[in-house]
Image (cartoon, helix red, strand yellow):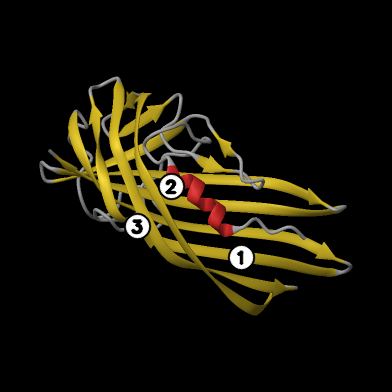
């Protein structure tokens, strides 16, 4: 069974707000700036859907929560590897300028220093859990992404704004949606929910990979 390295998730964050991304649904978990949680839907108990993205915003942090499940068969046994990751980026730099049709990013960068965990399940019973320390530094990067505003609180990027990595470690680029939430007049979060299911075949063995991630970017108006 081939289990995708959970640290390939760095590809999700290496180009956040810069380049293109695989399609994500627009969903907002219960959160305040810099934190994530809940199951989305009504926007949570904090912040407001009323506001404008227009202007220049400083990147404060990215909070990422993800779960990947890789299921396969070994004879009559069902094997499942579940990898969980939850962290907030550090040493964040750069700005995002929204003008109503384009998002211009300047000098966006950050570091990640965290530990993910993978738990093995045999026929539904949990077994060993393995920690995976993960550290990455993303250098400052510039870019431009056109977008459309949907309603009062959602942005849709036809050419993407986030990047993600497939099971082979290749960056994939496509459209992305974000839900906006405002806190006062100078704070905003952008939330993207990403789901992907793939069939992985390696050495004659097949496995089903299910991936779910919630990415919350916290911004401060300049």
In-front residue for pair 150/106: 106
Q: Quadrant of residue 91?
A: bottom left
Q: Mark 2 = which residue?
A: 13
In-front residue for pair 106/71: 106
- Disc sitting over residue 36 in the figure: 3
Q: Does dot 2 land on a helix, a strand or a loop? A: helix
**Mark 2 or 1, closer to the camera:** 2
Q: Residue at x 33, y 45 (%)?
A: 109
Q: Is residue 48 left or right of residue 211?
A: left
**Mark 2 or 3, closer to the camera:** 2
Quote the CA–CA distance across marks 3 and 1.
20 Å
Image location (x, y in percent) of residue 158 = 45, 24
Q: Quadrant of residue 1?
A: bottom right
Q: Is residue 55 left or right of residue 190?
A: left
Image location (x, y in percent) of residue 175 = 48, 29
Image position of 135 with respect to 165: above or below: below
Q: Are marks 3 and 1 in contact (CB under 8 Å)?
A: no
In-front residue for pair 210/116: 116
Category of crowding for the residue at label 3, using alpha-carbon neighbours closer than 10 angstroms: few (below 14), some (14–19), many (at least 20)? many
Q: Does dot 3 land on a helix, a strand or a loop? A: loop
Q: Are marks 2 and 1 in contact (CB under 8 Å)?
A: no
Q: Does dot 1 land on a helix, a strand or a loop? A: strand
Q: Mark 1 = which residue?
A: 82
């Amino acid at each position: 069974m081939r289990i995708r390295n959970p640290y390939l998730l760095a590809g999700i964050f290496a180009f956040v707000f810069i380049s293109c991304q695989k399609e994500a649904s627009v969903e907002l978990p219960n959160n305040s700036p810099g934190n994530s949680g809940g199951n989305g839907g009504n926007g949570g108990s904090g912040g407001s859907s009323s506001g404008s993205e227009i202007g220049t915003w400083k990147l404060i942090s990215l909070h990422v929560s993800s779960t990947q499940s890789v299921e396969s068969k070994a004879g009559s046994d069902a094997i499942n590897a579940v990898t969980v990751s939850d962290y907030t980026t550090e040493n964040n730099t750069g700005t995002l300028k929204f003008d109503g049709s384009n998002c211009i990013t300047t000098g966006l960068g950050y570091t990640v220093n965290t530990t993910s965990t993978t738990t093995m399940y045999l026929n539904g019973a949990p077994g060993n859990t393995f920690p995976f320390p993960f550290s990455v530094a993303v250098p400052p990067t510039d870019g431009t992404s056109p977008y459309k505003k949907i309603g009062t609180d959602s942005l849709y990027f036809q050419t993407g704004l986030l990047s993600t990595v497939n099971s082979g470690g290749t960056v994939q680029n496509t459209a992305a949606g974000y839900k906006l939430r405002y806190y006062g007049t100078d704070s905003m979060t952008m939330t993207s929910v990403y789901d992907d299911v793939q069939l992985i075949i390696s050495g004659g063995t097949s496995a089903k990979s299910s991936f779910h991630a919630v990415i919350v970017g916290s911004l401060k108006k300049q």
